[in-house]
Image (cartoon, helix red, strand yellow):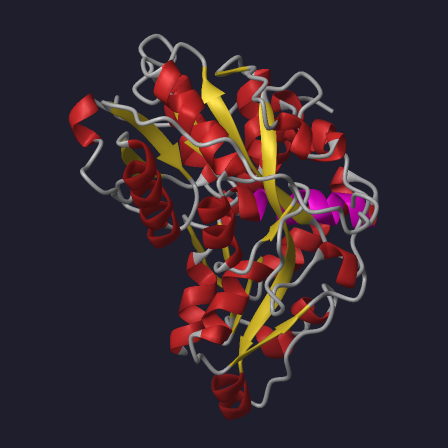
Amino acid sequence: MKKTLAILLVLVMLVPALFAQGGQEAAPAAPAPVAAPAPAAAPAPVAAGSGSVNAYTTLEEPLAAKLFQLFEAETGIKVNFVRLSGGEAVARLEAESANPQASIWVGGVGLDHITAKSKGLTTPYVSRYTSKTAAQFRDAENYFIGLYVGPLTFVTNLNRAKELGLEAPKSWADLLKPEYKGYIRMANPNSSGTAYNVLTTMLDIFGTEDKMIEYMKELDKNIDQYTKSGSAPGKSVATGEIPVAIGYAHDQVKLKAAGSPVVITAPSEGTGYELASMSLVKGGKDTVNAKRLYDWILSSPVAQSTFTEWYVVLVAEGSAKHPDALSINEIKTVAQDMAWDGDNVNKTRLLDRWTNEIGNKR
């Protein structure tokens, strides 16, 4: 297959002043089931530190803010962070590669971390806590480590669905039904790792890139708009702006827990999933404090409980699971080849096809 022209990424170089006191949104914004592990030993205390560290994060901003505030309270090290979608994070790291402005990237679909590795934007690190995470959930060369897994699912606003005479979709095939025309929202795969994961999931289900594109063309007929962030469509479902969205289960479970009239369904054909990860930035200026943050996230009980409150399913041994969180072991998943999916050449080709055959024709 001929590789089409790569998508032009228009970026403004970030200056250190953009790292806010708390954080800010970027401008305009299956592995085999794992047996329950034994409880982990208590981590060694983190020594008091000084100074600060600049970070990019693809975690939801409230989660990131809380996590980093807790880190500062324990260590004295301030985290100046900018919140970016996965695609934006990779693009910004690439644009800044000659003069990195961040030293660590926390969160984001593992496929994007693989892409960053393949572009030479991150650097390996073996933490004293790396071994707490099973090999299947971290890079073999230690360029990134998984934090949690989350499946792609559908979220439906029950009130809006009732008004429109719709049922909550239960399969990828359901999303193509004509009654959903204009009533489904998802993110743009060029900016969102969540949406790119949808493309790779369709590739896993249908087996060829041509069939994947054909499915996405049919789905496009029912999409009202593509958002920049992967979590944004679910938030629009929660408010009733749109009845159906595609996203990750933990974001949707949180909406339901907050009282939104939504139901979450997993596609019967099987679904893809993310391995939200963490990487150190190659050439980062705050390497020492970045490693301390990295170690703290992997080891601190406070950090682990904060993630659990967000309904994610952590992969480190001994991690607790919120009873309402949806594990990939509870639903049917597809067999993902994350190394292939995240490879820069493959990713660029898939995104070029989606953009040229679907995105640019809207």
Residue at x 68% of width, y 73% of height: 177
**Residue 138 figure quarter:** top right
Position of residue 126 relative to residue 9, above or below, is: above
Residue 134 placement, left or right of 54: right
Was residue 198 drawn as part of the magenta stretch in this picture? yes
What type of secondary structure mainly makes up the magenta span? helix
Residue 302 x, y percent position in the rendering:
45, 48
Q: Is residue 362 visible?
A: no
At a point 18% along the width and 38% down the height, the residue shown is 21
In the image shown, does 200 or 105 lie closer to the viewer?
Answer: 105
The region drawn magenta spans: 195-205
Residue 294 drawn above or below residue 362 = above
Residue 72 sits above or below residue 291 on the image: below
Q: Residue at x 50, y 31 (%)?
A: 44
Which part of the image, by quadrant, shows the N terminus? top right
Position in image of residue 175 (x %, y %)? 66, 68
Residue placed farthest to the left in the image? Answer: 17
- The foreground one among 8 and 247 is 247
Question: Residue 201: percent from the left, percent from the top?
Answer: 71, 47
Percent across and percent down for residue 66 are 33, 50
Q: Residue 3: say if magenta.
A: no
In the picture, measured across the screen, residue 311 lies left or right of residue 331, that is left
Residue 171 or residue 70, whichever sits in front: 70
**Relative to residue 141, is residue 41 depicted above or below?**
below
